[in-house]
Image (tube, helix red, strand yellow):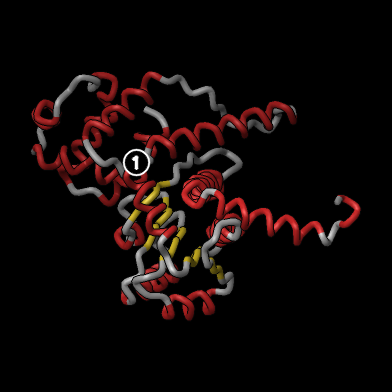
Amino acid sequence: MDLDISKRIKHLYPQLGKQSKKLADYIIENGSKLSAITVSELANQSDVSIATVSRFPQQLGYSSFSQFKWSMVNDLAATSSVQEVEAEDAPKVVAKKTLESNIETLNGTFNLMQGKDLKNARDLLVHAKNIEFFGLGGSNIVALDAYHKFLRVPLNVLHDSEYHMALMQSTRMDKNDCAVVISHTGNDSDTLLLAESLKNNHVPMIVITSFPESPLASYGDVKFFSISEDSKFRSEALLSLTSQLAINDCLYMLTAQYFGKKADQVLANMRKTILKKHPENN
């Protein structure tokens, strides 16, 4: 099995209980035989309880056993063309392998998305009095990207790149606002302090992380999971940026679609103002 299943199991494995680890081992070893299996059959064959099998997909970020099995079967059917970048590769080969890796990452991220989650996230965003994007370190780049995009829709958006300013802002938000909190690992103590502050103020949260069982994920009213694969010259945290930026794009497009002509007008006004800086292009 490739990225979507086996990589998630590997990340999650140390956090699993004894029975879930037993099930994980069985799935990895026998994945190609599970295309038509039922929950009860898998429980019997792996010698674990039906409850363990039912919970396992949620631990990986899937909404149901059926979705988990569908993704697993499709992953097994697909032959990955992604190869490691080698020291002797020509520049064009490096570019090809890098882009193929990005494509696989995006496909894996899409497979974990649920229509209801996208709709719920859109509804939180479009009805929020204020939206703030939170992210630290590499995730700050993603938060800034989201802020830059969402300036183009008729919403009040905020972003503080300095941590203490962000922490202060979190105390000023309330249930009528919405926070988008981004963290690859989902266990950074500073990010968790932000999330705790937001939760104390009953602020709805959209969480973007790579680990479904991370402490941060438990704070999310809506959760999206970024997919990434370690490679020789790029860490999974670096590659997860590709996935997280794409999730930003999806949320922005859903929001712009909702506002329609109002979003068009915001963008037109923005372009008109920016063109004043470049009068020769008018």
At label 1, the amino acid type is Gln
In this image, 123 relative to 163: left or right? left
Please state if 226 lies on the left or on the right of 44 as rendered.
right
Residue displayed at 53% across by 22% down:
81
User: Can you tell which quarter of the image residue 76 is in?
Assistant: top left
Residue 242 position (above or below residue 103):
below
Residue at 37% across / 72% down in the picture? 198
The front one of 12 and 219 is 219
How many residues crowd mark 1 within 10 Å: few (<14), some (14–19), many (20+)? Answer: some
- The picture quadrant where one finds residue 87 is top right
Compare residues 178 and 224 and report the one nearer the observer.
178
The residue depicted at 82 percent of the width and 61 percent of the height is 276
Q: Quadrant of the N terminus?
A: top left
**Residue 114 x/y as whole percent:** 34, 41
- The residue depicted at 48 percent of the width and 23 percent of the height is 80
Q: Quadrant of residue 174?
A: bottom left
Determine if residue 138 is in view.
no
Q: Tell me the element at label 1.
A: loop
Query: How far from the left and from the top, in percent, is residue 101?
Result: 55, 33
From the image, tell me which residue sits under label 1: 114
Q: Position of residue 253 (x, y in %)?
A: 52, 46
- Towards the viewer: 133 or 235: 133
User: Left or right of 179: which side holds 58?
Assistant: left
Residue 281 in view, yes or no: yes
Q: Disc count in the image?
A: 1
**Residue in the foreground of this view, choosing between 274 and 23:** 274
Q: Position of residue 79 (x, y in %)?
A: 45, 19
